[in-house]
């Protein structure tokens, strides 16, 4: 059986950096005001800078990473390496049971997500992720090197769409334009990627008409955005995480800022390595007019902030996850299950940051019907094909 974890960390300590994962699980905030066009030359872009603590370059595919084994695309919950049988037979037998009792889940390890209780129990190098069900605390993922298990078991290879709504006060977050569109992938083998989709990409929408991709959400909500991005990229998407402006600056303040290295100034943010407070982080996520490639550099900077958030989350330890999820739950709309969310966030501790590539899909601005739109190029097709394994 799993031991009775004697883990005495106070809830107050857990809350010191509760919102670090907001930068991982959402596309930060919406970008800019209504009515903007790209109007800039479009290329794959590294944006304005690089991540502090990790290479800002796209890593070589297949380079060594942390422990991990790929699972099937779009799987939910923990998975075993291909050919090794089921989780119940192979892993839970080693752990002793599929459920833990209340006495095995310390109060300080618990949190909530959309009304469900979640917990991350850390003991030495082992981490057990559990969700409260009627039968008890169900084990949904984790890693257990002390037991010789090859894990981690975090859902395997998958893609999740992070969206930022441009909703203003009084507007419906789910029926406003999606001006931040970031596709997050993990390959289940220690690698991953963050790919920004130009918001003005001219694609076939779920309605059947051609239009800008960010127009899918006003017409059909976030599930329509998932459908539009999936059909455009050819990548199955597990679900979405959607946020707006609410709480973003307070979130960054709560974690003590977020560190990035900027190659060039961005509006009032000087070049160099900076620990950004809430106001400056919001500026970096939204600014496009002063950037050489406009919206493409802005999308790249959003990916930069997501990567920086992942690195900050790694530094805080997986025991922070339940408090993190409790804090961001009111500010995020999603169709992912609690198990999918906690295993996705926990991937930050098992992904090697040097193996997480950042790109913006390549495109060229053109005029169609009097509107400036982005036509994705053949290079974008290659980028998307490369990303189907979850790794850029």
Image (cartoon, rainbow, N blue to C red):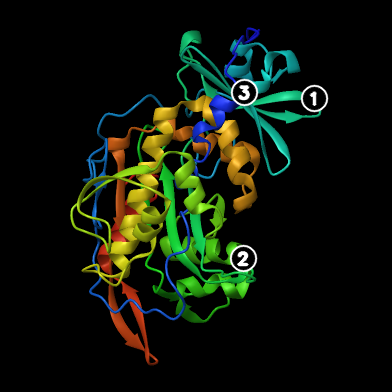
Residue 194 drawn above or below residue 203: above
Residue 65 image offset from top left, x and y in percent: 31, 29
Say which of marks 3 and 1 sits in front: 3
Residue 68 image offset from top left, x and y in percent: 41, 27
Asked whether 243 or 209 is in front, the reply is 243
Circle 3 sits on which residue? 109
Give whichever of discs 3 and 1 has the lower sequence position.
3
Query: In screen coordinates, is 224 left or right of 49?
Result: right
Asked whether 180 or 384 is in front, the reply is 180
Mark 3, other Cα within 10 Å: few <14 / some 14–19 / many ≥20: many
Q: Residue at x 50, y 37 (%)?
A: 345
Question: CA gap, disc 3 to disc 2?
Answer: 32 Å
Query: In screen coordinates, is 152 left or right of 224?
Result: left
**Disc 1 on helix, strand or loop?**
loop
Circle 2 sits on which residue? 174
Residues at marks 3 and 2 touching, judged by CB atoms closer than 8 Å:
no
Circle 1 sits on which residue? 135
């Amino acid at each position: 059986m799993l031991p009775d974890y004697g883990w005495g960390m106070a809830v107050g300590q857990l809350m010191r950096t509760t919102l670090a994962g907001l930068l991982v699980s959402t596309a930060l905030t919406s970008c800019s005001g209504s009515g903007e066009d790209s109007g800039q030359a479009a290329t794959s872009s590294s944006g304005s800078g690089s991540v502090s603590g990790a290479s800002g370059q796209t890593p070589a595919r297949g380079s060594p990473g942390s422990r991990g084994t790929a699972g099937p695309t779009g799987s939910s919950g923990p998975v075993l390496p291909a050919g090794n049988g089921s989780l119940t037979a192979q892993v839970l037998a080693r752990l002793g049971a599929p459920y833990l009792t209340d006495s095995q889940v310390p109060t300080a390890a618990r949190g909530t997500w959309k009304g469900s209780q979640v917990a991350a129990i850390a003991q030495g190098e082992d981490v057990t992720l559990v969700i409260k069900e009627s039968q008890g605390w169900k084990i949904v993922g984790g890693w257990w090197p002390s037991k010789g298990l090859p894990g981690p078991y975090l859902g395997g290879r998958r893609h999740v769409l992070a969206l930022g709504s441009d909703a203003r006060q009084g507007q419906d977050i789910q029926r406003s334009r999606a001006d931040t569109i970031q596709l997050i992938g993990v390959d289940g083998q220690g690698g991953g990627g963050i790919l920004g989709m130009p918001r003005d990409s001219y694609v076939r929408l779920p309605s059947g008409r051609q239009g800008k991709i960010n127009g899918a959400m006003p017409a059909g909500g976030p599930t329509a955005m998932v459908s539009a991005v999936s059909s455009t990229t050819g990548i199955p998407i597990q679900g979405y995480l959607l946020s707006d402006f609410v709480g973003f600056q307070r979130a960054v303040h709560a974690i003590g800022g977020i560190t990035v290295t900027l190659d060039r100034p961005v509006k009032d943010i000087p070049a160099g390595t900076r620990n950004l407070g809430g106001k400056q982080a919001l500026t970096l996520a939204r600014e496009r007019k002063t950037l050489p490639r406009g919206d493409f550099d802005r999308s790249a900077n959003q990916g930069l902030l997501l990567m920086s958030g992942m690195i900050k989350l790694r530094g805080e330890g997986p025991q922070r996850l339940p408090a993190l999820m409790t804090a961001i739950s009111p500010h995020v709309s999603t169709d992912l299950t609690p198990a999918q969310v906690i295993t996705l966030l926990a991937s930050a501790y098992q992904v090697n940051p040097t193996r997480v590539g950042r790109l913006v899909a390549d495109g060229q601005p053109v005029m169609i019907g009097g509107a400036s739109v982005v036509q994705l190029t053949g290079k974008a097709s290659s980028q998307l094909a490369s990303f189907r394994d979850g790794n850029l």
